[in-house]
Image: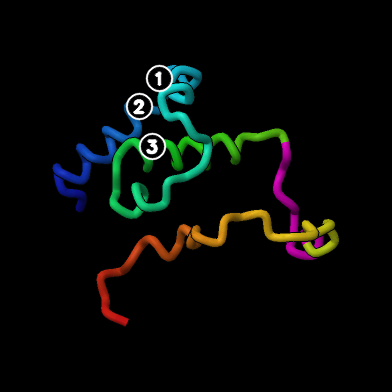
């Protein structure tokens, strides 16, 4: 069961995906993910991340066929991510206290 409110929220996210991405990129002013907005559930940021995931999935580079193949790939020399960013999985809570 999906509530009408949640259905409307999800439809709002997907309705923006078919718009002109070039002009959206200029309006946005940044290419990175704003984790605070994502954590707060801001529709525009959720839409941006969802679009990013979809575009990454459709990119020319295919994922490795197995974890063995992934282990054989060269690893980056250093972590180039900003230390302030938490993994996306930590932004979603099950509602249970830890």
Q: Residue at x 74, y 63 (%)?
A: 67
Magenta span of residues: 61-70
Residue at image mark 3: 47
Q: Residue at x 47, y 22 (%)?
A: 26
**Quick check: 53 left or right of 1?**
right
Please, what secondary structure does the residue beneath circle 1 have? Answer: loop
Which label was assigned to residue 19? 1
Which label was assigned to residue 16? 2
Which label was assigned to residue 52? none
Question: Is the residue under label 2 in contact with that under label 1 (CB below 8 Å)?
Answer: yes
Image location of residue 76, percent across then percent down: 78, 57
Mark 1: few, some, or many residues within 10 Å (few <14, many ≥20)?
Answer: few
**Quick check: 97 left or right of 90?**
left
- Please tell me in which quadrant of the rendered image residue 8 appears: top left
38 w.r.t. 72: above or below? above
Q: Quadrant of the C terminus?
A: bottom left
Q: Main secondary structure of the magenta part?
A: loop
Extreme residue in the bottom direction = 98
Image location of residue 69, percent across then percent down: 81, 59
Whole-number angstrom distance, CA of label 1 to CA of label 3:
11 Å
10 w.r.t. 17: above or below? below
- Please tell me in which quadrant of the rendered image residue 65 appears: bottom right
Closer-to-camera residue (50/31): 31
Image location of residue 25, percent across then percent down: 48, 25
């Amino acid at each position: 069961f999906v509530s009408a409110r949640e259905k409307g929220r999800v439809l709002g996210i997907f309705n923006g995906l078919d718009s002109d991405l070039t002009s959206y990129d200029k309006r946005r002013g940044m290419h990175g993910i704003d984790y605070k907005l994502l954590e707060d559930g801001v529709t525009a940021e959720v839409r941006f991340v969802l679009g990013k995931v979809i575009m990454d999935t459709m990119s020319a580079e295919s994922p490795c066929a197995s974890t063995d193949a992934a282990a054989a790939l060269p690893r980056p020399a250093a972590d180039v991510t900003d230390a302030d960013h938490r993994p996306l999985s930590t932004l979603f809570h099950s509602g249970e206290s830890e």
